[in-house]
């Protein structure tokens, strides 16, 4: 199984600023994803991070607000741009390694608070 | 589109058997997943059903009926550490779509 780490684990940011969250997987994985989990809610998929090409965004999420990079098979970043209090949430990185079938592993999450 | 329904909250006593239901309407179905999430932690994988029937894994079992769009997670010999949110998710293509989760409370 893949082990996923995220940085930072939490942050408090000012309105209008941007934060980049890093996701590192301990092995090469085929698929990486970014989810958002708002307080008391379930997980909502933001986008699929594609290695070497632009991310695939879900309805309601756009690249200008959530730019994503995936330079290789073990690393991805998510930027939350021009933040507002509504962006306060937990952001989770997830990966699927192909060797474990369809199982997806999750990182510990980044708890973001926007003031 | 995807539509997944689970009860919001359930309560049971230690040692009990609990069944958490999940109904779904989805296109491109590629399996039904159950995850456990303790407060403040990331979801952890519990089970995956792609064919109809019951999959047993220790104290946890998961059932799927594709024709009915229905699944359940069965928790046996309930323990205090089982207090958590249980998330039903459908797989479609390469991604997961999650239900709202069921908060399972365990009482002494």
Image (cartoon, coloured by chain):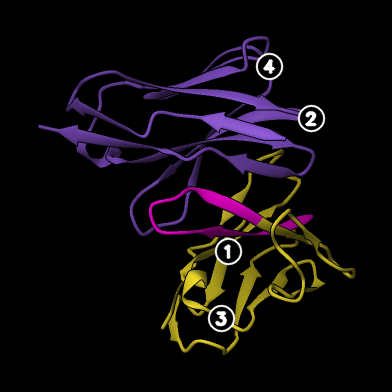
Chain colours: A yellow, B purple
Q: Chain of mark 2?
A: B
Q: Where is residue A49, by image quadrant? A: bottom right
Q: Chain of mark 4?
A: B
Distance between mark 4 and mark 1 Cα atoms:
29 Å
Q: Which residue is mark 1?
A: A4
Image height check: is A56 above or below A83?
A: above
Q: Residue at x 75, y 67 (%)?
A: A62
Quarter that holds the C terminus of chain A: bottom left
- Dot 2, how many residues are within 10 Å of its Cα: few (below 14), some (14-19), or many (20+)? few
Q: Are marks 4 and 1 on the same chain?
A: no
Q: Is residue A75 left or right of residue B7?
A: right
Q: Which residues are magenta?
A: A30-45
Q: Which residue is mark 2?
A: B28
Residue A42 or B76: which is nearer the viewer? A42
Q: Where is residue A20, by image quadrant? A: bottom right
Q: Which residue is mark 4?
A: B51
Image height check: is A45 above or below A72?
A: above
Q: Chain of mark 3?
A: A
The magenta stretch spans residue A33: yes
- Where residue B40 sits: x, y (%)? 36, 59
Main secondary structure type of the part rendered in magenta: strand
């Amino acid at each position: 199984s893949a082990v996923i780490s995220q940085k930072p684990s939490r942050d408090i940011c000012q309105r209008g600023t941007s934060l980049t969250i890093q996701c590192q997987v301990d092995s090469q994985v085929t698929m990486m994803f970014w989810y958002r989990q708002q307080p008391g809610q379930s997980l909502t998929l933001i986008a699929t991070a594609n290695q070497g090409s632009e991310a695939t965004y879900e309805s309601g999420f756009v690249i200008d607000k959530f730019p994503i990079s995936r330079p290789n098979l073990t690393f991805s970043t998510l930027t939350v741009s021009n933040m507002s209090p509504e962006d306060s949430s937990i952001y989770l990185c997830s990966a699927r390694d192909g060797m474990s079938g369809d199982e997806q592993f999750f990182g510990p999450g980044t708890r973001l608070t926007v003031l | 589109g995807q539509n997944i329904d689970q009860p919001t909250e359930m309560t049971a006593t230690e040692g009990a058997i609990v069944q958490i239901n999940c109904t779904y309407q989805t296109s491109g179905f590629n399996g039904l997943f159950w995850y456990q999430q303790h407060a403040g932690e990331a979801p952890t994988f519990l089970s995956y059903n792609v064919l109809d029937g019951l999959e047993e894994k220790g104290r946890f079992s998961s059932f799927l009926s594709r024709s009915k769009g229905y699944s359940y997670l069965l928790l046996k010999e309930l323990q205090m550490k089982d207090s958590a949110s249980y998330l039903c998710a459908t797989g479609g293509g390469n991604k997961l779509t999650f239900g709202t989760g069921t908060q399972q409370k365990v009482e002494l």
